Image (cartoon, rainbow, N blue to C red):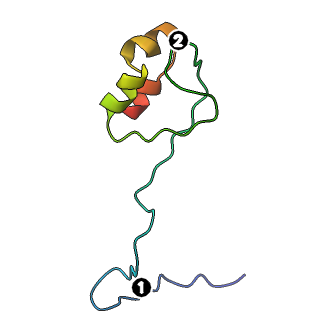
């Protein structure tokens, strides 16, 4: 069996080695939920920066309760 090598950290000029902007801070939440009472279209990506953005689309605690979902719960 091969020997497991340890972690090799290469620091570039005291930083974390990032050379350019990247998408490390991007998170995608994919959900299967009824759209009949929402202001959303099927197969459409929506950028949400805060829970109030989802609430403006109709995804709120009442929507979760009426549809037995946890969509708003996971967003908030």
| Residue bearing the label numbered 1 | 9
Q: For residue 38, which numbered disc appears in the image?
A: none
Q: For residue 67, which numbered disc appears in the image?
A: 2
Where is residue 29? Give x, y as percent: 51, 40
Q: Residue at x 30, y 83 (%)?
A: 15
Q: Secondary structure at mark 1?
A: loop
Q: Earlier in the sequence, mark 1 or mark 2?
A: 1
Tell me if mark 2 has few (under 14), some (14-19) or many (20+) residues whose alpha carbon lies within 10 angstroms of its own.
few
Where is residue 46? Give x, y as percent: 48, 38
Tell me if mark 1 has few (under 14), some (14-19) or many (20+) residues whose alpha carbon lies within 10 angstroms of its own.
few
Please state, as top left, top right, bottom left or bottom right, where the N terminus lies in the image. Answer: bottom right
Q: Nearer the viewer, residue 11 or 34?
A: 34
How far, Cα to Cα, is label 1 from label 2?
48 Å
Q: Is 15 placed above or below 56 here?
A: below
Where is residue 52? Give x, y as percent: 31, 29
Q: Residue at x 58, y 36 (%)?
A: 44
Q: Nearer the viewer, mark 1 or mark 2?
A: 2
Residue that sits furthest to the right in the current view: 1
User: In the image, 50: left or right of 8?
Assistant: left
């Amino acid at each position: 069996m091969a020997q497991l090598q340890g972690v090799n950290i290469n620091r570039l000029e005291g930083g974390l080695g990032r050379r350019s902007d990247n998408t490390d801070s991007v998170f995608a939440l994919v959900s299967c939920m009824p759209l009949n009472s929402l202001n959303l279209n099927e197969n459409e990506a929506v950028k949400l920066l805060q829970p109030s953005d989802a609430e403006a689309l109709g995804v709120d605690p009442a929507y979760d309760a009426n549809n037995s979902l946890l969509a708003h719960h996971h967003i908030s």
